[in-house]
Amino acid sequence: MVARRLASRLPVVREAAAETAYLAGHYDTALTEYRALHRITGDDDYLPIIADCERAVGKHQAALRTLREARDLKLSLPQQVEVILVEAGVRDDMGQRDEASRLLKEAISGGRGGRQGQARLRFAYADLLAEHGRPDAALEWLTSARTYDENNELEIDDRIAELKGEPVAEAPDLDEFEVLDVEEVDDVDDEPAEADEPAEADEPDETDDSQESVDGSEDDESDDDDFGDDESEDDDQSDHDEPDDLLDEQTPEPDEDEQPEEDEQPEEPDDAEPADDKTKDDLEEQ
């Protein structure tokens, strides 16, 4: 209802309010919401449930008029079945049991509504028989309806157990929400607490510093050794992996004007005299 007051012109809000009120048994509120929803959207598929709400609040003649209006319109297949079910309920409430039975049996024999529609019609006919003192016939129609209710939407087994006087199995708890414990926290004062002030740094212990320095030096040496090995490996790898064209670019070419310097060696003149006689004799022998 709060959402309806805040956004009364949104169809999704009015539909949520109508469905919730219908499931909660507040049929007068549901009737108001469904009528407003029909005016806003113009969807005639809401007419059968409007008639059902009118039946629930005791407006049977109004419900019959709404159903006659719906019967002349092109409703969806499930809503066509809903028109028959609601009219049969209205007739039964008004004491017209034979007419209610006729409507249901005619729709069942005509195969109206497909498999799920047949399941609903047979279920409603079984309920009509059970209310008028024919439980055995009702059980037969419930068994027949169960064969059409493939997805067990109608929970027919529970209805059969109820007619037989057997205990009905409790539905499993499908609560998807987990309740968490919420810890209450006191309001924080505007003034900062004393604990927030920065604490004075403690003076370092000399023994700890010395030990750290020793440990640090050992670690540094080991790190340096490792780093040196890595450098040597990288240098070797770079010498082998460097491309030839890069080496050519790095090697300077000699200038044409500048000739490379050769080792200067003194040239012996052809007419050089030997230094002594022994040398002269040796030369003559050669």
Image: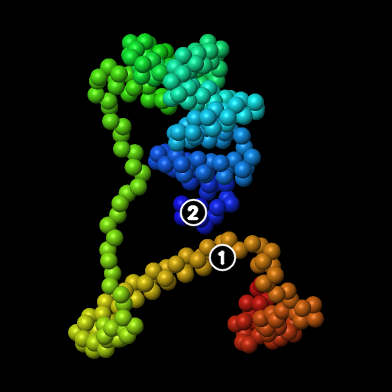
Residue positioned 26% across, 85% down in the render = 194
Q: Position of residue 56 (x, y in %)?
A: 44, 34
- Where on the picture, by quarter, is residue 180? bottom left
- Which disc is residue 3 wearing? 2
- Where on the picture, by quarter, is residue 93? top left
- Which disc is residue 239 wearing? 1
Q: CA distance from mark 2 to mark 1?
A: 79 Å
Q: Can see residue 146? A: no
Q: Closer to the camera, 151 or 195?
A: 151
- Taking the image as shown, residue 163 lies to the left or right of residue 226, namely left
Q: Position of residue 123 (x, y in %)?
A: 42, 19
The three-letter code of the residue at mark 2 reads Ala
Tell us which disc is closer to us: 2 or 1.
2
Placement of 169 over or under 223, stated as above or below: above
Q: Which residue is farthest right?
A: 257
The three-letter code of the residue at mark 1 reads Asp
Comes first in the chain, label 2 or label 1 = 2
Q: Can see residue 134? A: yes
